[in-house]
Image: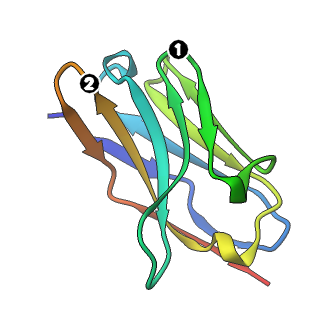
């Protein structure tokens, strides 16, 4: 069983930055897609950013130009650099990893990000 553990959440003022990290218990090369989702109170969970094993990335329109997803295979982590944060970015952020071959879908426990105005 693969475990994903997030870190890096917290409280920041609007305009500030945070870096989220997701550490996998096994090599990230086993995953076809790695991503970050978020869920604000009363809202559905939504995709924020994703990166494929080939390095292709996709971003939600609301974070394009502000957030950057990356991966570090040597450390078995993938990260979300969040700049120019806005109050509407406040949510619980979850990391996710999927494997097509094994039809596996793993989630982290979530980390709170709060942006004050």
- Whether 54 is drawn above or below 88: the answer is above
Q: Is residue 2 visible?
A: no
> Upstream in the sequence, badge 1 or badge 2?
1
Location of residue 114 (image quadrant): bottom right
**Whole-percent x, y for residue 70 in the image:** 61, 31
Q: Is residue 19 visible?
A: yes
Horizontal side, residue 13 vs residue 24: left or right: right
Image quarter (top left, top right, bottom left or bottom right) of the N terminus: top left
**Whole-percent x, y for residue 25 in the image:** 29, 31
Q: Residue at x 47, y 18 (%)?
A: 53
Q: Residue at x 65, y 69 (%)?
A: 89
Residue pointed to by mark 1: 54
**Whole-percent x, y for residue 41 in the image:** 46, 83
Horizontal side, residue 29 vs residue 26: left or right: right
Q: Residue at x 39, y 60 (%)?
A: 110
Q: In the image, which disc is placed on residue 100?
A: 2
The span from disc 1 to disc 2 (Cα, nearest Å) is 14 Å
Horizontal side, residue 90 vs residue 65: left or right: left
Q: In the image, which disc is placed on residue 101?
A: none
Location of residue 2 (image quadrant): top left
At numbered mark 1, what does the secondary structure look like: helix, strand or loop?
Answer: loop
Image quarter (top left, top right, bottom left or bottom right) of the C terminus: bottom right
At numbered mark 2, what does the secondary structure look like: helix, strand or loop?
Answer: loop
Front residue of this view, candidates 94 and 60: 60
Q: Residue furthest front?
A: 61
- Whether 97 is drawn above or below 94: the answer is above
Q: Are marks 1 and 2 in contact (CB under 8 Å)?
A: no
Query: In the rendered picture of this protein, how many numbered marks are placed on residues?
Result: 2
Q: Residues within 10 Å of mark 1 (few under 14, many from 20)?
A: few
Q: Residue at x 43, y 25 (%)?
A: 76
Horizontal side, residue 4 vs residue 69: left or right: left
Display coloring: rainbow
């Amino acid at each position: 069983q693969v475990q994903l553990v997030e870190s890096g959440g917290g409280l920041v003022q609007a305009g500030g930055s945070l870096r989220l990290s997701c550490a996998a218990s096994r090599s990230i090369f086993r995953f076809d897609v790695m991503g970050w989702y978020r869920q604000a109170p009363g809202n559905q969970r939504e995709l924020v950013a994703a990166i494929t094993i080939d390095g292709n990335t996709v971003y939600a329109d609301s974070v394009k130009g502000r957030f950057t997803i990356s991966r570090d295979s040597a450390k078995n982590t993938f990260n979300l650099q969040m700049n120019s944060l806005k109050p509407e970015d406040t949510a619980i952020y979850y990391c996710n990893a999927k494997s097509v071959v094994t039809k596996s879908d793993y989630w982290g426990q979530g980390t709170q990000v709060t942006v004050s105005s």
